[in-house]
Image (cartoon, helix red, strand yellow):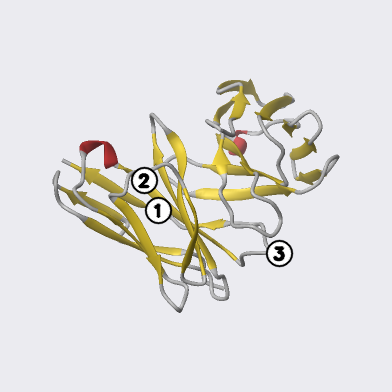
Amino acid sequence: ELKVEQNPLFLSMQEGKNYTIYCNYSTTSDRLYWYRQDPGKSLESLFVLLSNGAVKQEGRLMASLDTKARLSTLHITAAVHDLSATYFCAVDPTGYSSASKIIFGSGTRLSIRP
Amino acid sequence: KAGVTQTPRYLIKTRGQQVTLSCSPISGHRSVSWYQQTPGQGLQFLFEYFSETQRNKGNFPGRFSGRQFSNSRSEMNVSTLELGDSALYLCASSLGGGSSYEQYFGPGTRLTVT
């Protein structure tokens, strides 16, 4: 059964610092997603990574995918308070032409303090 | 373009009752997926519908069922409610199939079972 593991589960950072969230998964996958969730809110899509070596950046967030290592990273550069949220990675192993069955990691609760 | 809508947003039910939740996808999206989010189990995939057909199902008991209508709107039903069914239920829509990988989440329905 596919497992998706994130670490750390909790992260308290100072503003201005850099940090990385790691996402390991246990089987081959064609699609890797990163989502953000604010308390009491729904999920916001951040990145969709579809191929080995894919790198995407949006503002202070950058995501990458290494399908051989079954590892994705979400790097935060010069963190600001507005980035405080829970970040989820998710994997869909079902193939390009098949139905979706996205499996989520446990989430990383990120708190950025001044 | 209107986003994914879910109704109702909040619901309180008693053990043993049944409940129906509704999800209207983004216009043109044909795939609707349902997820359950709880503090203990995290985000878990329930099922995915595409063109009125269930294409994938998660590991939930038969009390959880769903359907999709010809206009792509989807409903999820939970019968004989248990306390453990208290959760945030999220639906997500996507174009579905091919390269349409990005899922857009609705605001969720928070179900409380007493």
- Nearest to the observer: residue B92 or residue A63: B92
The subunit letter for the residue under badge 1 reads B
User: Type of residue at label 2?
Assistant: Leu
User: In this orientation, which residue lies closer to the viewer: A78 or B62?
Assistant: B62
Residue at x-position 83% and y-position 41%: A52
Q: Position of residue A56 (x, y in %)?
A: 79, 45
In terms of secondary structure, where does tag 1 sit?
A: loop
Look at 70% across and 42% down and name the residue there. A29
Q: Quadrant of the C terminus of chain A?
A: top right
Q: Residues within 10 Å of mark 1 (few under 14, many from 20)?
A: many
**Distance between mark 3 and mark 2 Cα atoms:** 29 Å
- Protein chain holding label 3: B
Q: Which residue is mark 2?
A: B88
Q: Secondary structure at mark 3?
A: loop
CB atoms at circles 3 and 1 under 8 Å apart? no
Figure quadrant of residue B39:
top left
